[in-house]
Image (cartoon, helix red, strand yellow):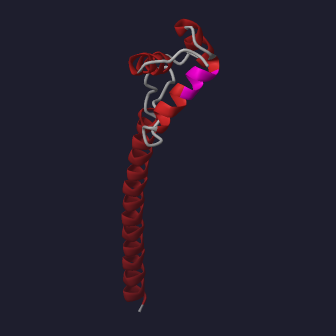
Amino acid sequence: MGKRIDAETRAQIVELYLSDESMTYAKVAKHFGVAFDTVRRIVSSELEAGNGIKPDRRAKTAQQPDWMEHITPFVRRKRELEEAVLHKKAELDKAQQELRDYLATIRQLMMEGGA
C-alpha cells in the first residue's frame, strides 16, 4: 500500500489538475510523486462531491463577435428598401387612380358632347 495522502495534498492535486487544460493525470502524478491511478481517483472523487458540476478546464478564447453585428446592416438596408417599395407602390396606386379619374371625366364629357 502506498503512502497516505493528507487532505491538504489532495486539495493541491485537484487544484493543480483543474488549473490548466494541459495538466493531465500523469503530469500531476509525476509532480507529486504518486501513482497515476491515485491522482485519477482523488480528482474523480472531488468532482463527484461537487454534485456533478465539473469545472470548465478549456482554455479561455477571445470572445467571438456576435453574428448579429454582421447581419444588422443588411437587415436595416432590407427594411429601408421594403419601405421605399411600399412608398413607390402607394405613389403608383395614386397615379393610376388619377389616370382612371381623368379617363372617366373624358368619357363623361364625350358622352355629354355627343348626345
Rendered residue at 59%/18% (across/down):
25
Q: Is residue 92 above or below residue 74?
A: below
Query: Taking 50 as reference, is 3 left or right?
Result: right
Provide residue 17's location: percent of width, then percent of height.
50, 19
Q: Is residue 99 above or below residue 36?
A: below
Q: Which residues are magenta?
A: 37-41
Rendered residue at 37%/81% (across/down):
109
Residue 104: name its quadrant: bottom left
Q: Quadrant of the C terminus?
A: bottom left
Provide residue 15's location: percent of width, then percent of height.
43, 19
Name the residue furthest bottom. 115
Is 96 or 13 nearer to us in this picture? 13
Provide residue 87's location: percent of width, then percent of height.
36, 55
Is 77 part of what is drawn in magenta? Answer: no
Name the residue furthest front. 1
Residue 31: name its quadrant: top right
Rendered residue at 39%/50% (across/down):
84
Q: Is residue 91 above or below residue 99?
A: above
Query: Taking 115 as reference, is 41 left or right?
Result: right
Is 93 or 104 nearer to us in this picture? 93
Provide residue 99's location: percent of width, then percent of height.
41, 68
**What is the chief secondary structure element of the magenta stretch?**
helix
Q: Quadrant of the N terminus?
A: top right
How many numbered tags mark residues here?
A: 0
